Image: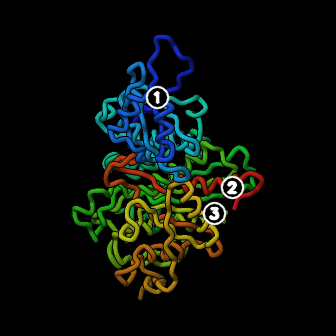
Amino acid sequence: MSVREADCLTVLRRRQKDGPTVHGVRAADDATLESTLKTLLGAEAATFALACGFTARPGQLVLVPDSQGHPVGLFGVPEKGRRDPYVFGALARNLPEGDWQVRVPDGVLRADVLLGFCLGAYQFSLKGEVPSGKSVRLVVTEAERKGLAVEMARSIWLARDLINTPANLLGPSDLAHAAREALSPFGADVEIIKGKTLDKAYPLLAHVGNGSERGPRVAVARWRGSKAGKNAPLLSLVGKGVCFDSGGYDIKPSSGMLRMKKDMGGAASVLALARLIMTQDLPVRLEVRLGCVENSVSGHAMRPLDVVKSRAGLTVEIGNTDAEGRLVLCDLLTEAGEASPDLLLDMATLTGAARVALGPDLPALFCNDDSLAEMLLEVSEREADPLWRLPLWQGYAGWLRSPVADLNNISSKPMAGSITAGLFLERFVKAGQRWAHIDTYAWNDSSRAGRPEGGDSPGVRALFAAIRLVFDAPDGAGA
């Protein structure tokens, strides 16, 4: 189970005489530190706070007594103009149990407080109880509880829960049904495809997934916003859902498998993004495709140098069975393109090369449209949810040649692995189709404010903000 919403949010509709005490947190940055101390605290308490070393460093928390002896939190936030929702996650972990109201200086968004607090409160456990054993609750209004920031947190909680679930409890069928369970309540029509129908429609995906006793599934969801007509813009999302990746016959070392339950992080992130789009009722037609498979070693697993004909008609030689993610995605991208969407996005935990280049926190962005890429980067910076663009450098396209098929699933060179993976996917994107591919890590290796160790979905906030700008901009101001 993950954190329950009641453990981190509370709505106090009426102050009751004998009700719970509500404590206060006063946030300050370096510029407002002196005025905050003078305004909120007496001379003794201000001296106490300074003696404790409070300098309003972002994320720093000091508890001081008010005039009645109740604790007041002093909390440091980034300087004006610099957003960091995650910093407020420290409050959820470090405040004493109870109900807390947070006040921030001008220029700090209330939405960042809500989102960061909720993300910091997240915990995952299969023990039947929240691991910390304490409940620190942020006081919110009813409107805030139903607003975008909290829905964003709920969607990211969903992705984190799925990524953190052990692979024996989340196989391909489980992931597909989790998609149905998450999206159907919003009116989405969710189809789960399996068996011979899947083999025929998605031959490369089937070639990966049929090596496991837990057969592959494709979840396809279709939804239309209440304000979207029959000709409304079509947004198509595709996610890699490899529930466990052994590497197949090109088997990973044991150390390389330790986190492979997270190899469905792209599908989980796409599911979070789709859910968020639906909660906000964006005026779009939406299609979601999740390729849910397990890459196993067995007597009927794919072999190195197999050749398979894709849905697009291109033949692919399997140069390495551990480069399975692109095989899962390419048939889905082909099918998505058949409807000529206005925008096609995919998310995948695709390559270690992207992590070597950018580390765990920066999803790699590949895009075939410069104006779209520039907009995505600008929005990601504004949302403090960064993406980093890498090139679809056509000079490396020849590295995917095969002597017996149209292309190989791996490069002939030991370099630029994330770029050649992007180039492979691009072969299955229709000419003229606006497309962006996000190569993400979907994991936090250690705990930080707002980002506990375990599964995560970086890039979802940025992509949602960009989608809303493109398709839901006021006065037609979208890109």
Direction bottom: furthest residue: 403
Direction top: furthest residue: 17
Q: Is residue 216 visible?
A: no
Which of the marked residues, 2 or 1, is nearer the chain's N terminus?
1
Q: Nearer the viewer, residue 49 or 183?
A: 49
Q: Which mark is residue 343?
A: 3
Task: Indicate the position of residue 76 as horizontal and vertical percent values.
Answer: 43, 43
Q: Residue at x 28, y 70 (%)?
A: 249
Tell me the element at label 2. helix
> Residue tagged by mark 2?
471
Q: Which mark is residue 24?
A: 1
**Does 7 sit above or below residue 318?**
above
Task: Indicate the position of residue 28 as horizontal and vertical percent values.
Answer: 48, 41
Tell me the element at label 1. strand
Give the class, few, some or many, for how many residues have Cα within 10 Å of label 1's Cα (few <14, many ≥20). Answer: some
Task: Indicate the position of residue 350 as horizontal and vertical percent values.
Answer: 41, 66
Q: Residue at x 31, y 38 (%)?
A: 126
Q: CA distance from mark 1 to mark 3?
A: 45 Å
Q: Residue at x 71, y 53 (%)?
A: 473
Amino acid under disc 1: Gly
Task: Locate the C terminus and report the quarter of the image it occupies.
Answer: bottom right
- Horizontal side of 299 relative to 149 (left or right) equals left
Which of the marked residues, 2 or 3, is nearer the chain's N terminus?
3
Which of the marked residues, 1 or 3, is nearer the chain's N terminus?
1
